[in-house]
Image (cartoon, grey):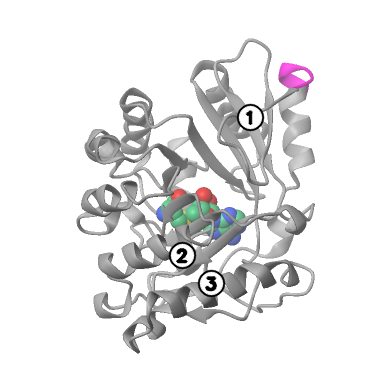
């Protein structure tokens, strides 16, 4: 599998406290000087394109919290070799930014929405901000940041009722969005226990009970682990990312860069490469490129089955 996809966390700050991600208010937020500057991000992405990276996704923390995000998008979107530039966001600041981001060269957006029931959204995220997120979804569609994808993590006892799952799936019937159910991955003693995860086969059964058998579809720009389906005559699609109940390491084409500049060959890898330190120590583009080529050639050595990291924080890694 060729490695052509880089996820860049541009901040580990977040304006939500999702129970499955980082429920405590302090998850070791970094000072500005410790995170990658725009120049460093630009340089790393540019060098990466020389090593085969074609798709870049900005994430966080919450990427729309990063000051001058539109400028960063504008600078990254014109790098030769980048074919796809996208963002994963909680959508809170999307409504005012969607058009500017699109004009700056952003192509697509994934929006995290774990419930479209206001009380439940607040219980999961800690904040009563669903109405603004909903406006952000409509604005993203209108601005052409498409196909818009909605990411939902289902947690037992919080948003696993038939009613809530069907309400999320129902968005794909009426709106041109792909609603993706992501299996919860336990990451630390502060997040929900592993037993609170609901396998996607149970989510699918609830949806098929109401809508009948889902038919498989191929989605444009879909190259990751999601499998896509459609409810008959629906405007959008339903995706399943079954990261707990299945293993897709051997088709993994992605690398992750944390906001403080550590490159992770695998989500579960305890071993990271400190690119920020390399840059601060004066490494040349050629030296960085050689390291990246080595990491890429060794990537298949890292899998969920042999990479052990005891605890990690998704808000640092970027999901
Ligand atoms: N703040 C942005 C957002 O909310 O989309 C980007 C960062 S967030 C860490 C990226 C993605 O990771 C979100 O879709 C979130 O649902 C997912 N995520 C976070 N913690 C997770 C966990 N423990 N298991 C599965 N997915 C998780």
> Which quadrant holds residue 29?
bottom left
Given residues 130 and 268, the one toward you in this image is 268
Tell me: is circle 2 under 8 Å from ligand 1: yes
Q: Secondary structure at mark 2?
A: helix
**Residue under pointer 2:** 315
Q: CA–CA distance between discs 2 and 3? A: 24 Å
* Mark-to-mark CA distance, 3 and 1: 35 Å
Q: Is residue 13 visible?
A: no
Is the residue marked by circle 1 packed among few (<14), some (14-19), or many (20+) residues within 10 Å? many
User: Is 88 positioned to the left or the right of 4 in the image?
Assistant: left
Q: Closer to the N terminus: mark 3 or mark 1?
A: 1
**Apparent side of residue 92 relative to residue 60 in the rendered image (left or right):** left
Residue at 63% x, 29% y: name it: 238
Q: Residue 246 appears at what percent x and percent y?
A: 79, 52
Q: What residue range appears in magenta? A: 209-214
Specify the label residue 238 is tagged with: 1
Residue beneath label 3, please? 292
Question: Percent position (x, y) of residue 235?
Answer: 55, 16
């Amino acid at each position: 599998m060729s490695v052509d996809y880089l996820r860049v966390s541009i901040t580990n700050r977040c304006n939500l406290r999702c129970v499955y991600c980082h429920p405590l208010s302090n998850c070791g937020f970094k000072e500005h000087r410790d995170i990658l500057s725009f120049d460093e991000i630009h340089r790393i992405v540019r060098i990466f394109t020389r090593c085969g990276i074609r798709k870049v996704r900005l994430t966080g923390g919450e990427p729309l919290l990063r000051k001058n995000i539109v400028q960063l998008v504008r600078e990254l979107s014109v790098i030769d070799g980048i074919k796809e530039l996208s963002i994963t966001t909680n959508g809170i600041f999307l409504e005012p930014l969607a058009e500017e981001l699109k004009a700056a060269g952003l192509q697509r957006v994934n929006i995290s929405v774990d419930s479209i029931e206001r009380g439940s959204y607040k219980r999961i995220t800690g904040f009563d901000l669903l109405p603004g997120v909903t406006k952000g979804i409509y604005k993203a569609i209108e601005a052409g940041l498409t196909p818009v994808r909605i990411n939902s993590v289902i947690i037992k006892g919080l948003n696993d009722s038939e009613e809530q799952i069907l309400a999320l799936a129902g968005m794909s019937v009426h709106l041109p969005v792909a609603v993706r159910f992501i299996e919860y991955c336990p990451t630390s003693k502060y997040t929900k226990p592993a037993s609170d995860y609901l396998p996607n086969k149970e989510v699918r059964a609830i949806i098929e009970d109401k809508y009948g058998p889902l038919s498989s579809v191929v989605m444009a720009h879909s190259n990751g682990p999601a499998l896509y389906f459609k409810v008959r005559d629906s405007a959008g699609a339903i995706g399943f990312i079954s990261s707990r109940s299945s293993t897709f390491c051997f088709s993994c084409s992605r690398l992750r860069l944390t906001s403080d500049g550590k490159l992770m060959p695998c989500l579960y890898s305890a071993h990271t490469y400190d690119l920020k330190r390399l840059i601060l120590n004066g490494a040349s583009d050629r030296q960085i490129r050689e390291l990246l080529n080595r990491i890429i050639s060794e990537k298949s050595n890292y899998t969920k089955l042999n990479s052990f990291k005891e605890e990690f924080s998704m808000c640092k890694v970027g999901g």
